[in-house]
Image: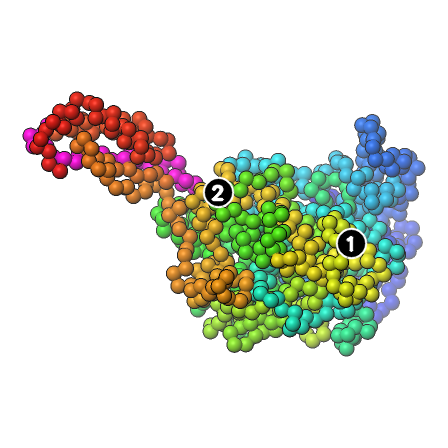
Amino acid sequence: VVNLQAEEHIVLLDPTIEQPEPQDPITKQPMQILDPIAKQPIEPVDVITQPKQPIEPVDVITQPNDNFDKTLFQQVEVTPEVQAKKDAILESIVSASLSTIERNIQAADDLDKAFFDKGIDKIGVSSTDAFGPHLLTSPQAIKIAISGKIFTGISKLAAEILNISEQNIERQLSRPVPILTELCNFSFLPDCTLAATSRYRTIDGSCNNLNNRLWGRSFTPFERMMPALYDSFDQPRQTSVFNGPLPLARTISSQFHAQSVLGDLMPDLSHMSMEFGQFLSHDIQRNALSTGYQGSNIDCCQPNRGDPCFPIEIPSDDPYYSQFNRTCMNFVRALPTPNLDCTMGQRQQLNQNTHYIDGSQIYGSDVATSNSLRTFVGGKLQTGADPNIPNLLPKDLNNNANCHLPSANSNVKCFLAGDVRANQQPALISLHTIFMREHNRIAEGLSALNNGWSDQILFDEARKIVGAILQHITYKEFLQAILGDTIMISYGLKPSTSGYFNGYASSVNPAIKNEFSTAAFRFGHSMVHDSLKYSGTSHLFKDVFLKPDLVYDLSGGVDTITKGLTDSYSQKVDERLSHQLTRHLFEQQPGFGGDLAAINIQRGRDHGIPFYMLLKTICNVDDNVHSPTVWNALNALYQTEFDIDLFSGGVSENSVAGGKVGPTFACIIAKQFQALKKGDRYFYENSGNQAFSPAQLDEIRKTTLSKVICRNTGITSIPSNSFVKDTGPSNPMMSCNGVSDIDYNQWKCGWSNWGPWTICVNSIRFRLRTCRQQKPCDANVCIGNAFQVQMCRTFIDADTSKIEALIQRFESVLAGQHKNDGVVDINTAQKALQKLSSQDIIKKNELDTNLVE
Ligand code: HEM
Ligand SMILES: [Ca+2]
């Protein structure tokens, strides 16, 4: 994409030997390496880069400065002539500075390489402290980020040159600039001709919205509810609205997001509610984090790494980490991306998964991943990590899915799934396994109908059904439990009990909102218990993070883990999080685990998420939604309530009536799921040419998470609603024995069985059958007649040929009524029969007294 100038670098490394100052080979002046975006000189650490071609000391900011009429960019309302002038100015700034920005990016890449060569940034799990699989950034995202860096760098530069304030950057700079558009990954649109009439979603989510073909596609930016609030245009929000630094993320975590205690259990919801939430989260969002050279993990606790780094500082009096003398926790910034319009503007972040609820965590968010998971036989997905345990996920032979393998048992391997985070902990692996099995089971069920379907149709249809089941469980059970009736009703989130949903609106952008992803939907982190219940025992999360072992346990495994989830409570959604997450996240040696609450706060700042009070106001939430103690605790930490981070302020609100999250998060979550419903052309309840038949839709509606669990594990009984732990009259235990499956007959193609014969009228009788050609059946799947006519009396001395002629005439009359879909209804047939009775031949036969039945 970018034509970067090739510069050869000689890297001399030895931290113990004092290195000479790097010099410009021509001017012999001391050289500086530029931080690509901040343009602050980067201390060259112990790395010396000597480009053969010097970086020209052109200051693009001061150089063309005087030629531009900056006042144009202070105006809001402009005439077309003024706009044309402004566009010309933008264009000349972009062309004047593009090569400098590119060189800065190259310099940063060179720095990455040096850290890699030195063995500081490593590939693999060992140096990922606190990140684990979340760091597995796809090459595609890294590619997009190259233009992301250009767009962000150039926008910032233009804003500085033109004196555009941070608040106005979107308004003044979101104009197409041809040279930039060429560099933008979102200016190439896919061909949607086939997808426009397809019954099936594309794998990557493109062509769902036919007016905006990239909406909801994987590898597109997160959208925002509110413009970002960065420090100096694109730097993490680190300063108070009254200046001075914000409190440290780790301090807020250790002081405010303290350890949950036993009394903080949910009164009703099971730990499965937590786990389904995470599974759903992994369907709709995966942020792309910065990586080092060749995808290595950047160690941000090394000084002077510039933009990709935003390490979490640990104060020296930390209540936990101080005993390990730990002062820093690794944290890399999320990669920048151009916005979807390919215009300049604020720094944005990239979602690597399809935004839609479409089972992409099972199937992958791009065709290559999807293909790598398929068997291409019978529509099924790959299985079989262990020959002794049927239907486990497939093994990850390259072991690049980032998990810890035991040295003792070489049989144990990481698993492969549609989302790379699948190995994060065994409960997540279990849900992945269950839904992979559900897919294969449905593919088998469809295949048994003998419709003659190819592997592709079996795969597509099973995937369509599984996606619909996921959506149904999400809206019918999960959101219902989290948001409660009032919110569900006011945002139109409740599924209908019959018929189609008519609310699809092509104007609604389904994209995951940044506020939802970095804060609101992380409410689930507060629901995580200390441990996974496992039969009579339990396992602390720190002992099972990234370890697939439990799943391979021959006397337990997926069934036992799943049973443990329905059989224990979640923690309440409140400011408290388990130490398993706030001290021991992905811990590999004592004292060196991560802190997820601190990461959530830091991530929000990295993304420039505005402070809590702003979102609360946007959501129309009243004051006094915190208990006084909690509100005081928050205000003791922050200089002002206008600094409070969205995650901290939101997660600690009192929950809405009937729901489990506070009103601000409820609002953000409800808006997001409303967009995911109204903005998804393939939403399972929609009508249209991609729709389920009404009878098929009714089958989807019968599904619950408990039934899916029953159908795919050896569990024998389970609460009817597995999101609710306690059983009783409203949530009876359900036996898995004979639990209802989908009625595949609603997918059967071709003739139905014959209906019963009619009574004998005028010597003949008939029967009907229906042609089932609902989608995805072949349109000409039925050959032959939808009816059969028969003589039903025998005549003594009868003239058989005349009777046969009668039957033929009857058939031709019926055939005249034969509808296109092959269905002849009884009334039509009966009318035809009446017409026939006026015929002579019938009259003659009626007079015959020797009729025999
Ligand atoms: C044991 C359970 C869990 C662990 C260990 C875990 C861990 C993590 C980690 C390490 C991240 C990346 C943080 C960052 O770098 O910004 C993350 C992100 C996130 N988590 Fe969790 N999480 C868990 C459960 C959940 C649950 C139950 C939910 C929701 C109900 C959830 C929602 C999210 C969301 C929305 C993100 C942002 C995802 C993205 O866009 O990349 N997590 N989680
Ligand atoms: Ca998805």
Q: Secondary structure at mark 1?
A: helix
Q: What percent of the width, then of the height, locates residue 139?
A: 65, 52
Queried whether the magenta region covers residue 771, the answer comes back as no
| Amino acid type, callout 1 | Met
The magenta span reads 773-799
Callout 1: CB less than 8 Å from ligand 1:
no
Rendered residue at 49%/47% (across/down): 497
In the displayed structure, would residue 319 be above or below residue 41? below
Q: Secondary structure at mark 2?
A: loop
Rendered residue at 82%/42% (across/down): 168
In the rendered view, does 419 fall on the left or right side of 621? Answer: left
Queried whether the magenta region covers residue 784, the answer comes back as yes
> Residue tagged by mark 1?
613
> Residue tagged by mark 2?
499
Count of labels in the image = 2
Q: What percent of the width, then of the height, locates residue 463?
A: 49, 50
Q: What percent of the width, then of the height, locates residue 831?
A: 28, 28
In the rendered view, does 91 fall on the left or right side of 703? Answer: right
Label 2, label 1: how many angstroms apart (C-alpha)?
41 Å
